[in-house]
Image (cartoon, helix red, strand yellow):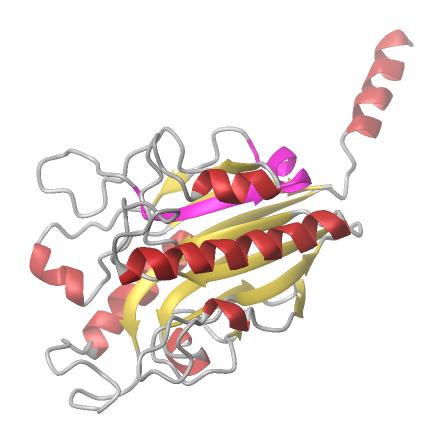
Amino acid sequence: MRALILLALLLMAVPAWAQEIKLTTWNIAWLTTKPAGHPDLPRDLTTRTEQDFARLRTYAERLAADVIALQEVDGPLAAARVFDATAYDFHFPAESDVQRAGFAWRKGLHVTRNPDLMALDLRPTARRSLRRGADITLHGANGARLRLLSIHLDGGCSQGSIRQPNSSDCQSLGQQAQILAEWITERRRENMPFVILGDFNRRFSRDDDMLPLLNATSPMRRATEGFSNPCWSRDGQGRPFIDHILLGLRAADWLIKDSFRIFSYGERDPALRDVISDHCPISVRLQLP
């Protein structure tokens, strides 16, 4: 009888409707349906062949993610060349940039599309702007809500100070960091669990001054902390990540222990980086109550 009571208590402690979600971020590097020579593309860009798209589709299937934050993707048509449009829905900001941040998620998930984080694009009229943030809310099976933000921040300041910038890129990144801090403040005010994931173009070293700025608004858990990035490593040595997954408020508690994964490609020929991606997907698993 005591054993039955104990079993019943354990079942009550873990709701049968708890939902496991795999979150991934993947910069697919100039993923576009535009042909070579298109004026929106760099002149020296190597465009992908049907074989290249087929390779990416195979990797997307193996990745088997529920929600994917995408970067450098030219909208839903390009995303559908990699992710099966009969299995995934897509969302991208209302901008014309080739390198957009966005989302793909499995059909059947309850997702709300939120307004773009337009302020992140500090140069909206430039030919190649600094990209808006894509903002969605994932609704769990038992009413839990999770706000997700896919970003691709300004490059060129992977290690420099943003508080005392010595370049225009570091100055721009500092402005974007402040905008993210304001977005985080809104989530804290709403008491809304959140995840910011994507290409930060930033190595969060010990003396970094960007991550403390964000954490001052609301402390977050960084999934990449303590890990090095083996993506396209020639000598077996990892390097610091610039893609990150930051979990705030209760989302940090929902993180499944030891679920962080780095998806490495099977190819080793560095010449293939341009037709696969110079970024490897990273992922975590969350247990939504």
Rendering quarter of residue 33: bottom left
Rendering quarter of residue 262: top left
Does the magenta run of residues contain 79?
no
Residue 38, visible in the rendered structure? yes
Total count of labels = 0
Indicate whether 262 appears above or below 130: above
Which residue appears farthest toward the top when viewing the image?
Answer: 2
Residue 89, visible in the rendered structure? no
Residue 225, x across and y down, in percent: 40, 33
Looking at the rendering, the stretch of residues picked out in magenta corresponds to: 241-256
Quarter of the figure that contains the N terminus: top right
Query: Measuring 9% from the left and 36% from the top, which residue is drawn there?
Result: 235
Query: Measuring 85% from the left and 21% from the top, which residue is drawn there?
Result: 9
Q: Is residue 3 left or right of residue 254?
A: right
Report the front residue among 24 and 100.
100
Rendering quarter of residue 116: bottom right
Q: Is residue 278 left or right of residue 71?
A: left
Residue 159, x across and y down, in percent: 27, 44
Quarter of the figure that contains the C terminus: top right
Does the magenta run of residues contain 244?
yes
Residue 112, x across and y down, in percent: 68, 68
Query: Measuring 89% from the left and 8% from the top, which residue is drawn there?
Result: 2
Residue 192, x across and y down, in percent: 72, 50
Query: Measuring 38% from the left and 57% from the top, which residue is drawn there?
Result: 173
